[in-house]
Amino acid sequence: MRIRLNSEYLGFPAGTIVESSGLWGQAAFLGKCTILSLNDNPPVTVPYLVNKVASANVRNSFDAAAVSTSATYAKIKTITLPDGLLGGQRFLFDLGTNDVDVAAYGKIYRNGVAIGTEQSSSSGIGSITLLTAAPVAAGTGYLPNEVLTIAGGTGGTATVATIASTGGIQTVTLADGGTGYTEGVGNILTVVQAGGAAGTISCTANAGGVITSIDSIGVIGTGYAVANTLATTGGSANNDATVNITVINGAVASFATTPTHDGYGYTTGTKATAGSAKGTGATIAVATVSTYTTKSEDIVQEWLPRDTCELWVHSDGAATAGVRNFRIAYDDAPTVAVTSANS
């Protein structure tokens, strides 16, 4: 078979005429050559046949991060090879999971058919592994054991371990109903405590002028501490009703250092928080995050024009599999002298 190269291919300039009984027939099929004849003498010597070998030299890449929640293999990334490839290639990708207790799996496919071996990873995809206990900003109005959402990624949460010893009124109970209050709802009383200020409650009094219930907290105030039989003022009465503060909310004193949920997509540094019932303004430091694991596999594969090299993934359970830096790396193989015979 005699063929002419239409464009540069495998190291030969356009216009070169070569002859082959095998691989160069594939070259003709690849659309780089024109068949001149099937039986022509004398045979033409092909000086060098250049295939590819796997290397560290990245030639094709799709680096953007992507995730999949599929429990069975699903295509997540595609690299189209417009001119095909011959020989060996190295396939690399970063693989991880949003739950380090659950593995993620990946495999190389060609045109929807698996050609690679299964790779697995339990490394997180930017999952939080450690939080700093001391808040960057303490904020106000938080409760112990509140679980807050951490900004800057997806799904990461932190637990408020402790709050300041003083703060706003969160929960208050009636100690003594006092006397002389106006019957009905809407008696507004101010809670009196040394160091506390501006905390108010709305109460109901019976026909005898006795407070029978605390209906709501009007203003949480500041500087209050848990205590019993605190005096009150207001309500056009005798100022003799007393109350117990059983729970306060306040500035965050410390966070649990282990995330409630590790999430994914995070970097280290200061992050805002959200999700508190009444608290605002607290920020937290993400100390460490887990990283993807890089997977690498060398495969000898012939790729035809417009073949698609695909990365498919799945995860166990309800976890999210994540990938990034999907790459193909190769170099020209060492040249080998070849002489072809007619076919």
Image: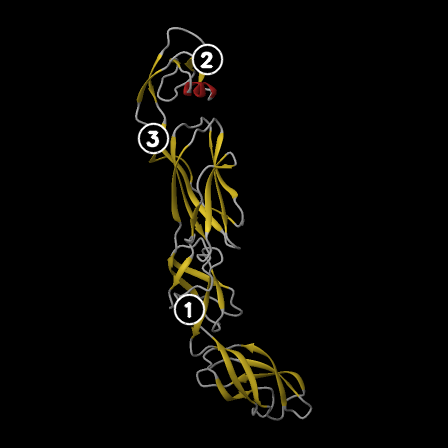
Q: How far apart are the alpha carbons under marks 1 and 2?
A: 73 Å
Tell me, yes or no, whether the two marked residues, 2 and 3, touch with CB atoms within 8 Å: no
Please provide percent x and percent y for residue 292: 40, 50
Please provide percent x and percent y for residue 177: 60, 90
Q: How far apart are the alpha carbons under marks 2 and 3?
A: 28 Å
Tag of residue 100? none
The amino acid pointed to by label 3 is: Asp
- Crowding at mark 2 (Cα within 10 Å: few <14, some 14-19, many 20+): some
Say which residue label 1 marks: 255
Say which residue label 3 marks: 331
Up-down relation of residue 300 to residue 44 (above or below): below
Please provide percent x and percent y for residue 129: 40, 60
Q: Residue at x 39, y 49 (%)?
A: 293
- Along the viewing direction, whichever of 160 and 118 lies nearer the viewer: 118
Please provide percent x and percent y for residue 52: 36, 29
**Quarter containing the C terminus:** top left
Q: Earlier in the sequence, mark 3 or mark 1?
A: 1
Residue 58, quarter of picture: top left
Q: Nearer the viewer, mark 3 or mark 1?
A: 3
Q: Which residue appears farthest toward the top when viewing the image? A: 41
- Crowding at mark 1 (Cα within 10 Å: few <14, some 14-19, many 20+): many
| Horizontal relation, residue 71 to residue 122: left or right | right
The amino acid pointed to by label 2 is: Ile
Tag of residue 35? 2
- Along the viewing direction, whichever of 141 and 85 lies nearer the viewer: 85
- Crowding at mark 3 (Cα within 10 Å: few <14, some 14-19, many 20+): some
Up-down relation of residue 146 to residue 195 (above or below): above
Tell me, yes or no, whether the two marked residues, 3 and 1, touch with CB atoms within 8 Å: no
Residue 158, quarter of picture: bottom left
Q: Earlier in the sequence, mark 1 or mark 2?
A: 2
Q: How far apart are the alpha carbons under marks 3 and 1?
A: 52 Å
- Along the viewing direction, whichever of 1 and 65 lies nearer the viewer: 1
